[in-house]
Amino acid sequence: MRVESVLLVLFAHYGSCAPPFSFFFLFFFSFSFCNLTEAGGSKLREKTFPWKAAGGQSLTPACTRGSMDIKEYFARISYRGSYDKPDLETLTEIFQHHIQAVPFENLSIHCGESIELDLAATYDKIVKRKRGGWCMENNHLLSWALKTLGYDVTLLGSKVYVPEYDAYADDIDHLLLKVVLCDKSYIVDSGFGMAYQMWQPMELISGKDQPQTPGIFRFLEEDGTWYLEKVKRKQCVPNQSVSTSHNVDKEVCRRVYLFTLQPRDIEEFRARNLHLQTAPDSLFVTKSICSLQTADGVRALVGWKLTEIKYNYKDNMDLVEIRILADEEMEKTLKEKFSITLDKKFVPINTSRLSLF
């Protein structure tokens, strides 16, 4: 846009009734504006459309929160693929890299640290300090990354199923994401962890089996409430003496959680975030948890028990290997198995009777 073009527009708007000094101000403003757009137009486009550069080429998306940088996030999850268009293939690739790089863990509670929901704090913890987090951290960070790339993302809240009580939680205690692509809705959840962690975005459709490496997932919908469940494989557990899984042999299908499509804001999770890390009867207070998806399964450290699962290793059966660690093995195991190094002393715990498998 030329300077004279801007002046003509401004004059047409204000007419001759504006005081003389205002034209000097308008001329100065328009001159500065045109210099900005002509000399720095590409930078302006980068701010307005963070995933596009001049000419429409792929670009490092601009971040609006301090030192948060999408390329640094990609380095953290070892993602080296393209991200020039927000499609399902790219979403799936980023999602899978995230769950295989960022553990689901609550170790902060057992290191004398608090878990914050501010995005900058979550970014610092997971990306810069190379830690993991629970659902409200993992999915909050992932939502930022996806929004930065141009995805249509909505936060949702769910209530997790507790098999020992045969009931869902009374209050929303889990954060997940809905992503809309080409008029189709997908559920994206990088923060459930353990053996019920989905490995691919799931199309939001009721009654359809969606086979994935961990097993068959499906949604069921009833009166606006959606239910996620997973069909389990049989398990081969060589060391049965240390297995305490809930109904390993009897349970065929596990309910995971229920949710509605009501959009949520991260502020709605603050009270629950505090409760889950402070209430004496909270699962996360009574169990120290760290789990990470691998190329062919999942590994988890709960208290002193290290469980490693290889999915579908033969005859539609999962191999489950369990070992009880000594205190002196904990630091090395966290570093070698989960790539986690803690700043403070970690005190493992496992006093809850609730099962995570």
Image (cartoon, rainbow, N blue to C red):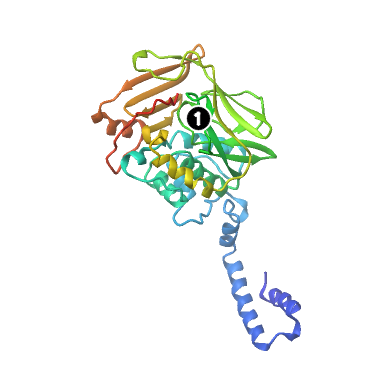
Residue 200 shows in the view: yes
In percent of width and height, residue 15 lies at 75, 82
The quadrant in which residue 143 appears is top right
Of the pair 255 and 162, the residue shown nearer to us? 162
For this orientation, the residue located farthest to the bottom is 20
In percent of width and height, residue 312 lies at 49, 17
Placement of 303 over or under 340, stated as above or below:
above
The quadrant in which residue 28 appears is bottom right
Placement of 236 over or under 220, stated as above or below:
above
Q: Residue at x 41, y 44 (%)?
A: 126
The residue that label 1 is drawn on is: 197
Q: In which quadrant of the rendered image does the N terminus lie? A: bottom right
Q: Disc 1 marks which amino acid?
A: Gln
In percent of width and height, residue 218 lies at 61, 26
Q: Residue at x 50, y 36 (%)?
A: 190
The quadrant in which residue 181 appears is top right
For this orientation, the residue located farthest to the left is 328
In percent of width and height, residue 186 lies at 62, 36
Of the pair 61 and 125, the residue shown nearer to us? 125
Placement of 41 over or under 261, stated as above or below:
below
Q: In which quadrant of the rendered image does the C terminus lie? A: top left
Mark 1 falls on what kind of element? Answer: loop
Q: Is residue 36 left or right of residue 126?
A: right
Q: Residues within 10 Å of mark 1 (few under 14, many from 20)?
A: many
Q: Is residue 61 left or right of residue 30?
A: left
Of the pair 126 and 268, the residue shown nearer to us? 268
